[in-house]
Amino acid sequence: MQNLVAPLAVKDTGKPVQNLQFILYFFTQRSTDPRPKQLFQKPNFVEAFKKETHNQQFGPATSELVRVFQVVFKIPLQPKEEGSVGAATADRFNAMLKEFSGLEIAIPEGYPFDTADPHTETQPEPQPQPQPEPQPQPEQPLFEMPTIIPDAQEKNYRVSGYVLNKQNSPIAGQRVMAFDIDLRGARNYRTAKSFKELAANGGVQPLNVGLSDINGFYSVQFPGISYKDKEASVIDTADVIVVAIRSDAQELPAILQTNADIIGRSALSVRTDYKDDQLVNWNVILDDEKMRSASEFSRLMDVITPLLQDSKVELYTLKDSADQAKFLSTESDQDLFHINCLVSADSLRMDSLGNFIALFMFVPKYPYPLELFYGLCRQGISGDWQTISKMSVASVQTLIQKSISENIIAAQGNTDEETVKQIEQFAASLHGFSVKQSLDQSAAKPQGIKNILSTVISDNDDLVKKLYSGYVNKTGTTAEFWKNLRNDESFKDKVDTLLLTNQLSALTGNQPEIMKALAAKVDKNNIISLLKLSAKDWNDVMATTNDSPENNTMQTNAMISMLQAAFPNETVSFMTGNDLSIADKDVADAISKFLTDTGFDLRINRLTDPSATNEPTFRELLDVIAGNKKEEVTATLLRIQRVFQFSPSRVILSKLLAAGIESASQVAAIPFATFKVQYSSVADEDTLIDIYRRASHIVSMVQFNILSLKRLSDTAGISAIAG
């Protein structure tokens, strides 16, 4: 048997085809994979293969056997190469033929088919042929074949890495060649676009060729060679460059007879780059920015599809079986994360079967829209409809385009315009379907979003979907969304109630019974009015839950704390009338009006800050509101603000002020043992510890800032002298 020479395809005839058929039968004998032998157990196949071997013809049976071994040997292919012998298939078959020592055998042992030449019996007597005219002698080869040094024959070197495009995506099926470069060759190796240009100045010696696999990985081995001038006497490691080439030839001798194009290259190695006689991660970068290999999705599907078909298993059925997914990953030698993404994508495809049937503009190779779902999953989107429903149409488009740019999935059309249109249609359809799925799934849960929204928009699923979709796809701020909603005829009379529902949902943790009870006590859809509820009001609200008194008390306190934290000014404003013990009603009213009307925030603002409208300052606004009592109003407000900073609740604030506390420094100056005795009427010991820690922290921060300013001042003074 002899090495195959590509191409060979259906309808070819002659000795090359007979040689291929010998090799295929030989592989069937030697392979441990059962699939080739299963073909020879089928009478129809055997009869068809017998006729093709008799006629030395490449027919359907030969093609089928080629296809089986392409799968067995995991040969990376384009779809049109399946069942025929292209460069990648010939290279792999020749390598396996050598590995099985088939080159030493003329005909496989026990070969049961006809080996006679079918043309010999009817071949006419040879007729004298005109003598061909003398042809010009071929040009001398550009490179000399490597010369093996006897002392170095047992030592092998290896260079390996990935063939990548400009986007750092792997390129499968790319032929590469390694060269040794010396001082003369260093002139051209960076810029040469062909073998002729590379060899123009001499100093270039070919080492060996290789082919990138399905993941873009290549490995080239070369023996100890005379990496030196003829007059040199020492053996050194090769200064290697690996180039990507475009050539119809496959084997090293044939390639060296051509002026192959150089379409990419690696860096040039030096002696220190070698690790144990190997150059690793020696990546080859292609020059063409538009060069793309088969997408990650396509390569993955080409590998696992035969395994799934043989097992009669569908991808989506593996969703609930981590062991099966792991098994598929191991058998296909593919990353488990990629397999899980594929399983998740196929599960989404099956859930939405029929929803996208009319969208695609071309016939996809794999079930639509599996590839697009895979692109989303690879960008970190989990395979559940609730997560997808919260993604805007624009964000879906962006993620899919990102997967295309990273060559995770292929472009979805023949032109950029087709791809954009296809993705837009898919994203819009996906969003509508995912919102419906998410709302339908939530309907079974009392705390689900559909039931929450239905408290305002009852018996109108279309409006619920419109609101949900509109919020997810909003392009401006949340405030702008609600403003725009007031201009929508479907919602303009529902916006205030929707806003309140949204606030009550956050306040109660999506508990419909408590939401309804609180909504009945809200004044004019303003949640701030809940700050005025009495203890009895809260007890009435929580009576709707049928929970234990202890749990009701805990939840009530949590909701009150949340309201007070969200609306600190309003909280203190409501307290000025009764809870803060302000004797002068005019002072109390002035403080309440100031906190309600000016936008002053007790948590962060100072009176010297500019107001929300930038001018005047808050102090100036306070002076106007306070009138002739501005000194008393200012002093009282500042005292309230200071104590507010370390008060854990409204009740504690009121008690601390009533107890005569003026500031954090007053609290921190007292030993805690004294503080807890002196102010035991304010709160229990745990709360007093909390108050004391808060006050001490505020004092510590003030002291730290003072020291920091002092250090900065000292440094500035020394710098000024030094300057």
Image (cartoon, grey):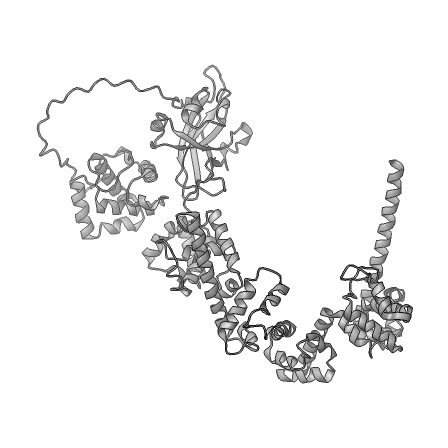
Q: Is residue 77 above or below residue 450?
A: above
In this rendered view, identify the residue nearer to me: 356 or 680: 356
Residue that appears at 15% across and 41% down: 54
Instruction: Report the residue at 64% width, 65% height from top.
Output: 479
564 with respect to 96 (left or right): right
Counting every numbered tag in the picture gives 0
Q: Is residue 596 visible?
A: yes
The part of the image, by quadrant, that contains residue 683 is: bottom right
Instruction: Please identify the quadrant where the N terminus is shown.
Output: top left
Query: Residue most toward the top?
Result: 231
In the rendered view, would you say 628 is above or below 70?
below
Q: Is residue 336 visible?
A: no
Q: Quadrant of residue 557?
A: bottom right
With respect to residue 132, does 615 lie above or below?
Answer: below
Q: Is residue 365 left or right of residue 634?
A: left
| Viewport quadrant of the C terminus | top right
Q: Is residue 634 above or below residue 133?
A: below
Image location (x, y in percent) of residue 716: 86, 43
Q: Residue 217: image x %, image y %?
A: 44, 40
Q: Quadrant of residue 664?
A: bottom right
**Residue 376, percent from left and from top:** 48, 56
Q: Nearer the viewer, residue 329 or 389?
A: 389
Across and down, in percent, residue 529 comes to: 71, 77
Q: Which residue is found at the position 68% from the left and 85% from the top?
A: 540
